[in-house]
Image (tube, rainbow, N blue to C red):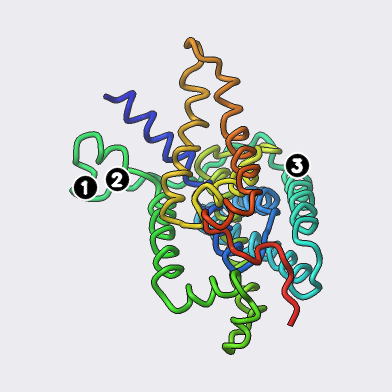
């Protein structure tokens, strides 16, 4: 039983940064802006969170400021693609390269340092006493609970509030939204900023809790997995809960099954093979409509 609790707990740990990044990117894309710079924003968030936490001795300061750094980078992408109407794919790729390079440059002096101020697990009274389920779900880090809460709140806002209707209108038909008095640019800026903040928090979770040290390249392609998870989740943050933790389990199994009859290398390839497959399938226009892809995703809006 202890082994199962440990493994399932690691599934949740590995899936949490994917969930944070995915729910943020869902908002950016629902508003019609494709930001492929998630990998770079997560990398900057990881080194920012680690550096601030290490120097201040407070992981919460590192976590919050990492979100701010991710948000600042996303605003660069927003300015280039929304105000200047540049190609969103090119801008996102450039943001990824810049973010990964910047994190490596800043992190040179932190390589190999183990983080002392870390997030501690919090046991929820009564619920944590439930056999197996309580140990797995209700004795996690505070960030895990925050990620779950954000997924639910973001879903409610997107599909049950007027603000959600406005966001979806900007991604589906921005001209109609503007004719209704909506400032499309403002909505897109806000949603891209939300995506950047979430990406920064996702990176910080990796360096502050998942792997509490700094290693160059520690994001290891998770930003690209997030892009595929948005599609796999059909731009729905509640569905992202399942898909993100499913992918998190695959990351863990590659280590847990070492020495078994399965080749761990094949397990390591599975998230990336699945991501590529999802992107290929979503390239079909008929399937895009069925999965709920925003109609004007990736297209700059001109008044």
Q: Which residue is labeled 3 in the image?
A: 108
Q: Which residue is mark 2?
A: 138
Q: Is residue 181 above or below residue 33?
A: below
SS type, badge 2: loop
Label at residue 127: 1
Nearest the eye: 192 or 217: 192
Depth check, mark 1 against mark 3: the one in front is 1
Q: Position of residue 24 (x, y in %)?
A: 55, 59
For residue 22, the mark is none
Q: Secondary structure at mark 1?
A: helix
Q: Earlier in the sequence, mark 1 or mark 3?
A: 3
- Residue placed at 65% from the left, 42% from the top? 280
Asked if one can make out residue 112 in the rendered structure from this viewpoint, the answer is yes
Residue plotted at (48% across, 73% down): 164
Q: Mark 2 or mark 1, which has the lower sequence index?
A: 1
Q: Under tag 3, what secondary structure?
A: helix
Task: For the N terminus, give its image quadrant.
Answer: top left
Q: Residue at x 80, y 62 (%)?
A: 87
Q: Is residue 125 left or right of residue 286?
A: left
- Foreground of the two, 236 or 96: 236
Q: Could you tell me how far apart the alpha carbons at marks 2 and 3 are, in whole angstroms?
A: 36 Å
Front of the two marks 2 and 3: 2
């Amino acid at each position: 039983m202890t082994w199962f609790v440990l493994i399932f707990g690691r599934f949740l740990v590995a899936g949490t940064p994917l969930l944070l990044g995915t729910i943020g990117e869902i908002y950016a894309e629902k508003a019609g802006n494709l930001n492929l710079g998630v990998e770079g924003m997560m990398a900057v968030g990881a080194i920012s969170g680690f550096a601030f936490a290490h120097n201040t001795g407070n992981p919460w300061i590192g976590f919050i400021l990492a979100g701010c750094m991710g948000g600042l980078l996303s605003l660069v992408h927003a300015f280039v693609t929304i105000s200047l109407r540049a190609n969103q794919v090119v801008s996102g790729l450039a943001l990824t390269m810049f973010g990964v390079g910047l994190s490596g440059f800043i992190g040179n002096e932190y390589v190999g340092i183990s983080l002392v101020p870390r997030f501690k697990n919090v046991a929820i009274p009564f619920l944590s006493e439930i056999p197996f389920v309580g140990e797995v779900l209700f004795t996690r880090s505070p960030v895990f609970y925050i990620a779950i809460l954000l997924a639910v709140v973001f879903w409610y806002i997107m599909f049950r509030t007027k603000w959600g209707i406005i966001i979806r209108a900007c991604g589906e038909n921005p001209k109609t939204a503007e004719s209704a008095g909506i400032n499309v640019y403002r909505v897109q800026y806000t949603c891209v900023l939300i995506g950047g903040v979430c990406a920064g928090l996702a990176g910080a979770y990796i360096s502050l809790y998942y792997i509490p040290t700094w290693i160059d390249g520690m994001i290891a392609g998770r930003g690209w997995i997030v892009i595929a998870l948005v599609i796999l989740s059909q731009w729905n943050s509640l569905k992202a809960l399942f898909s993100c933790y499913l992918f998190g389990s695959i990351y863990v199994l590659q280590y847990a099954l070492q020495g078994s009859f399965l080749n761990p290398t094949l397990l390591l390839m599975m998230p990336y093979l699945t991501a590529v497959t999802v992107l290929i399938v979503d390239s079909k226009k008929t399937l895009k409509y069925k999965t709920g892809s925003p109609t004007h995703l990736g297209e700059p809006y001109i008044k």
